[in-house]
């Protein structure tokens, strides 16, 4: 009998690290999770300690293996999925970070983006990269590090420094510095990669003041980037063989392999992606054109709409306002009322993303009075998350020229039945929740298995995908229109 082959997936997110171990039938055999500290040095600034992130990965590797009752030698391949635009810079010789990583939510480069927009550069940037000029992306964050860390720009010019998003950092650490690499899905989020050639673009590097010598190699999403070396939990020589940004990995894990298939992930932010096939689609509605994945010589593109705040709004109710003890308690609190009593919430706690792209916008509660309770506020927060997705879906339909017959959903907040039902109601579209909500981890594992030869084709993941529940729209058209009008007025004021 052939030995069972297991794939380990590292899902490194904004607030914590997941590690999952899957068998050849895509069943989760063991998993672990660990949160890490968020750093807020100034208003609008968000940072992560790269070494602390790595410590959570190391800890979770051992815990997941113990949960699965496996040894490190049982692992056939390692896959990585990650928070995307978060930007790190470290010494090539020692691996020591020069500064805490600047997180995708960070807004410190908003003025630089506004300056470039004022010079008329946005149309060129969008044409080359598929992205808009916004501090969300890595390019201006990297330039900030080079300009504000003493000596960094000179050291970068001498080839002493390495830039990476979190995927690159993890491969570097897993291979003990032998591999400095990213994949096309993560590279497409930097503002520095040409969406057509899939290579670093010299014109964009010049515009943002980034020397080519700090950049990693751009690889496919399923290939052997290097092998493990010097780890406590895993033996040397295991191939690190799959990699994709978290949202692209979720699209893959949801088996959205045909053009027009779409998913929405509800994590710290909310992210709607649609597979648009083998050619990028230019957006006229404020969406992003991005790479979904590359398998062999074949590249698949996606349209993406991002709402910066989703689950983070529930965390704010817990940590900032103290209305709930656990994030999972929000559904019970919100269910104490049947409607918000005209309270509406705009989750612009880190600006507004697509299709608005207003980094200066701030969160807003409107429509409350003396009768407003904590339950009304909690329900308004959940509805605000769903109403953001309504705007993204409308823009996606317009840009793609396609209807979206059903939304596949995943992420932690997709377990919230109240949120999913309201999402179906305001969209007027079925919302389909899979049995396995950890589709980001599933996507990373499957890409790694493809890269290492554990699986032969994506057809195997489509056959394994199963729905758990379908939320059908129940809201009357007049009620839906009332919600949307309240929302539009509130967004204008945010």
Image (cartoon, helix red, strand yellow):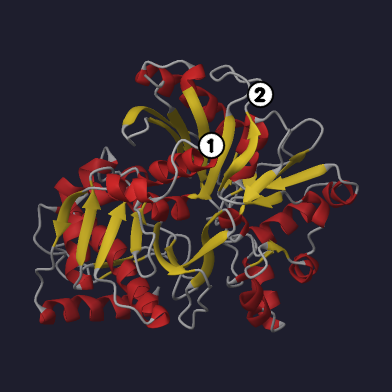
| Image position of 283 with respect to 153: above or below | below
Relative to 302, 211 lies left or right? right
Q: Is residue 226 above or below residue 426?
A: above
Q: Is residue 358 above or below residue 88?
A: below
Where, by quadrant of the figure, is residue 6 drawn?
Answer: top left
Mark 2 in CB contact with mark 1 (< 8 angstroms): no
Q: Can you tell which quarter of the image residue 171 is in? A: top right
Per the model, the C-alpha gap separating discs 2 and 1 is 17 Å
Tell me where residue 442 appears, x and y as whole percent.
Answer: 39, 42
Q: Which residue corresponds to mark 2? A: 229
Q: Is residue 162 left or right of residue 361?
A: right
State left or right for residue 383 relative to residue 52: left
Q: Quadrant of the C terminus?
A: bottom left
Residue 242 placement (x, y as % from top left): 54, 42
Q: Nearer the viewer, mark 2 or mark 1?
A: 1
Q: Is residue 492 left or right of residue 278?
A: left
The residue at the point 56 percent across, 39 percent down is: 241
Q: Is residue 316 visible?
A: no
Pointer 2 or 1: first along the chain: 2
Residue at figure coordinates x 25%, y 46% from the top left: 323
Q: Nearer the viewer, residue 263 or 52?
A: 263
> Residue 384 location, x and y as percent?
29, 64
Mark 2: which secondary structure? loop
Q: Is residue 446 visible?
A: yes
Pick the front one: 48 or 405: 405
* Residue 318, x across and y down, in percent: 31, 44
Residue at 47% x, 50% y is 246
Element at label 1: helix
Residue under label 1, please give it.
452
Residue 81, disc: none
């Amino acid at each position: 009998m052939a030995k069972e082959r297991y794939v380990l997936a590292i899902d490194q997110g904004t607030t914590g690290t997941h590690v999952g171990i899957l068998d050849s039938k895509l069943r989760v055999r063991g998993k672990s999770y660990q949160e890490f500290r968020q750093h807020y040095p100034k208003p609008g600034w968000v940072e992560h300690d790269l070494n602390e992130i790595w410590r959570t990965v190391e800890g979770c590797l051992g815990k997941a293996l113990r949960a699965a009752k496996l040894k490190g030698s049982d692992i056939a391949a390692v896959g990585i999925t990650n928070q995307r635009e978060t930007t790190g810079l470290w010494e090539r010789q020692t691996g020591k970070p020069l500064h805490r990583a600047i997180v995708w939510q960070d807004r410190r480069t908003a003025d630089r983006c506004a300056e470039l927009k004022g010079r008329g550069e946005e149309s060129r940037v969008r044409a080359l990269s598929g992205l808009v000029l916004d501090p969300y992306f890595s390019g201006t964050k990297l330039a900030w590090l080079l300009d504000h860390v003493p000596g960094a720009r000179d050291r970068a010019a001498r080839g002493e420094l390495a830039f990476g998003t979190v995927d690159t950092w993890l491969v570097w650490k897993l291979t003990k510095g032998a591999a400095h690499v990213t994949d096309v899905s993560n590279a497409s989020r930097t503002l520095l990669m040409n969406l057509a050639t899939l290579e670093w673009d010299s014109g964009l590097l010049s515009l943002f003041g980034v020397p080519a010598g700090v950049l990693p190699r751009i690889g496919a999403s399923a290939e052997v980037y290097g092998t493990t070396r010097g780890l406590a939990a895993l033996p040397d020589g295991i191939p690190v063989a799959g990699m994709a940004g978290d949202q692209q990995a979720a699209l893959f894990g949801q088996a959205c392999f045909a053009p027009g298939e779409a998913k929405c992930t509800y994590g710290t932010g909310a992210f709607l992606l649609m597979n648009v096939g083998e050619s990028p689609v230019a957006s006229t509605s404020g969406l992003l054109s991005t790479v979904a994945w590359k398998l062999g010589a074949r590249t698949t593109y996606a349209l993406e709409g991002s709402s910066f705040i989703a689950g983070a709004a529930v965390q704010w109710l817990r940590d900032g306002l103290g209305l709930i003890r656990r994030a999972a308690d929000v559904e019970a609190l919100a269910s104490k009322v049947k409607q918000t009593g005209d309270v509406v919430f705009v989750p612009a706690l880190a600006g507004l993303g697509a299709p608005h792209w207003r980094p200066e916008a701030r969160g807003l509660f409107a429509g409350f009075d003396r009768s407003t309770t904590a339950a009304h506020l909690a329900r308004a927060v959940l509805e605000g998350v769903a109403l953001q997705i309504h705007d993204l879906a409308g823009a996606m339909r317009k840009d793609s020229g396609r209807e979206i017959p059903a939304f596949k959903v995943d992420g932690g907040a997709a377990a919230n039945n109240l949120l999913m039902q309201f999402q179906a109601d305001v969209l007027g579209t079925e919302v389909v929740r899979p049995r396995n909500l950890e589709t980001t981890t599933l996507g990373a594992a499957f890409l790694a298995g493809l890269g290492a030869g554990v699986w032969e084709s994506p057809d195997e993941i489509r056959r394994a995908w199963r729905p758990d529940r379908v939320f059908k729209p129940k809201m009357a058209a007049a009620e839906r229109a009332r919600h949307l009008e309240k929302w539009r007025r509130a967004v204008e004021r945010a």
